[in-house]
Amino acid sequence: MGIKLGGASIGPENYTIAGVSVNYFALDNLSVGTAYEYWFSGKPTVSKATVESTYYIPASEQLKPYFGLLYSHYFVEDNSDIDAYGYRIGIAYIKSPMFFSAGLRQEKYTSDRAIFSDNEATGEFMIGFSF
């Protein structure tokens, strides 16, 4: 389970993002999960629901490159919803019960709405605990 607090921009609007995620290792090195984010302090407000799967390559006991697939659905206030799909790649350092990861996440939007560009690549950085 994870908690997210961060920021993002869509055009001239700056957003504060709060979210929660749940991931489960369904098989060795394969994580499946879901996440929800609420984007506020900009207009329009946006909620984002995501399902994802990530495979951690067992390169060593503590260092694991990863790649994954994701699907997101954006609920946009007073506008049509937007769907997106994408991938994530990076590297994770795992020393139980803590983990650190850094990588790249890219989404392609299935809509050409003016508030979203066609593609978006973002960096991701995570610090967490497993239990």
Image (cartoon, grey):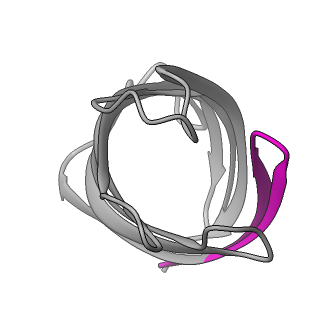
Of 123 and 49, the residue lying toward us = 49
Residue stretch in magenta:
1-18
Image quarter for residue 99? bottom right
Q: Residue 42, relative to residue 92: is it above or below?
A: below
x then y, percent, for residue 106: 50, 25
Q: Residue 71, relative to residue 33: is it above or below?
A: above
Most common SS among magenta residues: strand
Of 67 and 4, the residue lying toward us = 4
Q: Is residue 30 magenta?
A: no
Of 77 and 29, the residue lying toward us = 77
Residue at 32 percent of width and 38 percent of height: 84
x then y, percent, for residue 40: 70, 77
Q: Is residue 112 left or right of residue 97?
A: left
x then y, percent, for residue 129: 63, 72
Q: Is residue 131 left or right of residue 99?
A: left
Disc count in the image? 0
Q: Is residue 73 left or right of residue 90?
A: left
Residue at 70 percent of width and 53 percent of height: 126
Q: Is residue 43 visible?
A: yes
Residue at 46 percent of width and 20 percent of height: 118
Of 1 and 95, the residue lying toward us = 1
Q: Is residue 66 visible?
A: no
Image quarter for residue 24? bottom left
